[in-house]
Amino acid sequence: MNKESPVPSKEQFVYRVFESIAKDYDRMNTILSFGRHKAWRRFTMKMMRVRPGDSAIDVCCGTCDWAIALAEESVTGEVVGLDFSGNMLQVGREKVDERGLGDRIRLVQGNAMELPFPDNTFDHATIGFALRNVPDFRHVLREMTRVVKPGGQVVSLELSKPTWPPFRAVYYVYFRHVLPLLGKLLAGRYEQYRWLPESLVHFPDHRELARIMEEEVGLADVRVYPLTGGIAAVHIGRKNEKAEEEGSG
């Protein structure tokens, strides 16, 4: 009788990847994106227009850079950082404490597919470089929409697909071949960084993701900002206030 070795689910595999690369995550992000990920996040924050006192949840918060940015912009509002990787949260907790934001940022180990918060809790829900990694990105976007207040924002900053064909060809060579080698040389991890390009293959481009957010998730006024030739994109949608009114009517 043959015993089949269990194949890990996407969720299990992603969990193992991020548990294993947590200590190198920030350094590798800076190297592999040529430092652009910081500028992309600053741009996203500018477009979000977070106000003092606003509350926010950063889903799949990783090492908490975005949660920290949200807390600093909000000044007094509560920010929750949620991630399923304990190792990533540990790195993030150290950064939060270093900045003296421990009383303002609450870190929660949890599942993006089942956010442990009531409906209409936050002014903003963000997810950075993680939407393509979750088991069902549509479901995660719906969960983010659920926990946001009517009129609140759901925001994704994610890798995307370059729009200009010559640049796209060069980018894919870097992303598929050079990036995993750098991961091996600089972090001692090849398979983990080889998987990252593969995670983008079946993920929608920025136009299709905007359509999904509007037509399938039900967000209103979705704004799209392709960045750096389209290798990343910001999507900002607003929770429909009318739907909430109809639901309570």
Image (cartoon, rainbow, N blue to C red):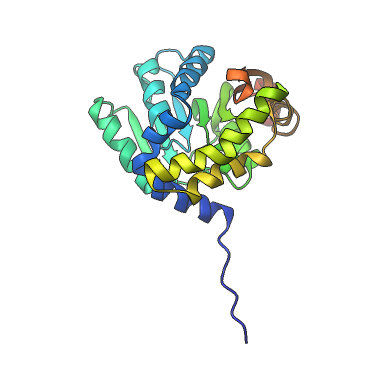
Horizontal and vertical percent for residue 99?
Answer: 26, 25
Of residues 2 and 91, the one nearer the viewer is 2
Horizontal and vertical percent for residue 79?
Answer: 40, 28
Total numbered labels placed on residues in the image: 0
Residue positioned 39% across, 16% down in the render? 73
Of residues 116 and 86, the one nearer the viewer is 86
The C terminus sits in image quarter: top right
152 shown above or below 91? above
Residue positioned 57% across, 30% down in the render? 158
The N terminus sits in image quarter: bottom right
Which residue appears farthest toward the bottom when viewing the image? 1
27 shown above or below 43? below
Horizontal and vertical percent for residue 86?
Answer: 37, 48
Q: Quadrant of residue 153?
A: top right
Horizontal and vertical percent for residue 18?
Answer: 44, 46
Residue positioned 41% across, 28% down in the render? 30
1 shown above or below 145? below
Residue 12 shows in the view: yes
Residue 85 shows in the view: no
Residue positioned 51% across, 56% down in the render? 12
Q: Quadrant of residue 210?
A: top right
Of residues 61 and 199, the one nearer the viewer is 199
**Residue 152 as seen in the image, left or right of residue 45:** right
